[in-house]
Amino acid sequence: MAAAEGGWCLWKLLRFFYSLFFPGLIVSGTLFVCLVIFLWGIRLLLQRKKKSMTTSKNGKNQMVIAFFHPYCNAGGGGERVLWCALRALQKKYPDAVYVVYTGDVNISGDQILEGAFRRFNIRLIYPVKFVFLRKRYLVEDSLYPHFTLLGQSLGSMFLGWEALMQCVPDVYIDSMGYAFTLPLFKYVGGCRVGSYVHYPTISTDMFSVVKNQNVGFNNAAFITRNPFLSKAKLIYYYLFAFMYGLAGSCSDVVMVNSSWTLAHILSLWKVGNCTSIVYPPCDVQTFLDISLQEKKTTPGHVLVSVGQFRPEKNHPLQIKAFAKLLNKKGAESLPSLKLILIGGCRNKDDELRVNQLRKLSEDLGVQDDVEFKINIPFEELKKYLSEATIGLHTMWNEHFGIGIVECMAAGTIILAHKSGGPKLDIVVPYEGDVTGFLADSEEAYTETMAQILSMPAERRLQIRKSARASVRRFSDQEFEVTFLLSVERLFK
């Protein structure tokens, strides 16, 4: 029965893609039927391969649980979710074999695990097998200067094929947002599939940016100036959103990281019966030993930013607002200030962005007051958060924001963008008191930073206490409970 159902779903999925790319040939259907037969044959071969791989020394079959995470050594919030999810599953299913598909080919598995401990203070209970993928370049945005979303999504299918050919799991979980790999593993690999969605590949907010002809990091100025190009891009977005929804709907289990992400995924994937919010794990407990009293080892204040150096994080806004604050400081006699940008670099593109940010600091004349800390250990991150007065976060429609929660748990007053997860889930009142601040423009960031710095120390302390109390719901322990409840149907 399951095989018949899988075959019928595979037939429908292939028929859709075939009609999309080969509309003139769908009448005869000869090529289409040959494609179905070929892929069904591949599936049978993969099932045999899986049976031979999962037999343990004592002759029993072992369940194989695989995570698709091509950038598992990146050191961001998504990677923290990966390692905590693996640790939670190992506690409940100790006899299973655990696999991580990664494109980090220039580093060993032991080094990846050591990096997870160094950055996140997480050690797994049992060993993990790493399947190293050579074609990760196919999902790099730099490879697709135009039609980036479509290029990366199709690239992820080829990367997923490489992964599937090396290891066929029983349970497949995409933990990075490559939805187009889901039908591949479900219908060709015969796996039960789940998704942890940090951020929808496309959202209705992206439609509005193009429709209103607003310039953004994913909407170039030359497109906004041309009504025809804007309409063409909008049509492309709608078509892509349809394909994205079709791929995502293949999930047996869908987990999202915030209320904002939930609304978009429900709209696009339409699988509300198997979708739930699982807040990302934040190492709240580790930060609770940091004193909430302001340290006066220096006469000034430290401002920190925690987040990977990706374009959507909008680090330039932080530097520009900080430069304005320094100008304001001269007029209002604020204490000395230092901005420290802490984040991970995944590749050369991220390193180039850091160099561009350094250049921006020089152009604005604030290079002596801005520092960059790249891929630092967890203990060093903890040290900076313990010394900081303000934590900055400037991404528009941030899906969640683990760095925001860490700042609040450490007693750093957060100033985040007035949108997405920070607005809906994190920086919300707790027992009637303020837990942080939100802003949505360069001027608003500057004004709010000045407001926080000019507050009496007693008022800042009260905000810190409320913020710390409010983020306990995002702890590692809470994540383990909700994650295991959500994935339970994958193991029945």
Image (spheres, grey):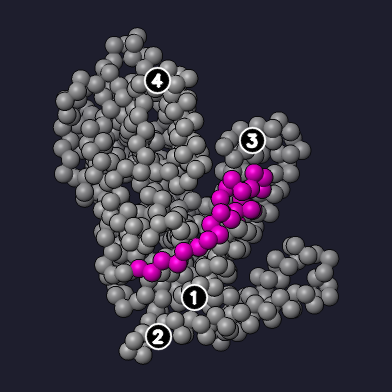
Which residue is under mark 1?
168
Report which residue position mark 4 lands on: 366
CA separation, marks 2 and 4?
61 Å
Quadrant in the picture for residue 109: bottom left
Residue at numbered disc 3 = 220
Rate crowding at label 1 as few (under 14), some (14 to 19) or many (20 or more) other CA atoms within 10 Å.
many
Q: Amino acid at mark 3?
A: Ala
Disc 3 is placed on an element classified as loop
Q: Is any part of residue 433 visible from this angle?
A: no
Horizontal side of residue 325 vs 456, given as left or right: right
Residue type, label 4: Val
Work out whether 329 lies above or below 39: above
Give me the disc on residue 205.
none
In the rendered structure, which disc, 3 or 1, sits on the residue that comes first in sequence?
A: 1
Q: CA distance from mark 3 to mark 4?
A: 28 Å
Of callouts 2 and 4, the N-terminal one? 2
User: Mark 3 and 2 residues: CB-CB less than 8 Å, in contact?
Assistant: no
Q: Which residues are magenta?
A: 128-153
Q: Is residue 339 left or right of residue 235?
A: left
Q: Amino acid at mark 1?
A: Val
The answer to whether the residues at label 1 and label 4 have Cβ atoms under 8 Å apart is no
> Does dot 2 land on a helix, a strand or a loop?
loop
Viewer-side residue, 152 vs 449: 152
For marks 2 and 1, the one nearer the N-term is 2
- Residue at figure coordinates x 40%, y 85% from the top left: 55
Spatial separation of the CA atoms under disc 1 and disc 4: 53 Å
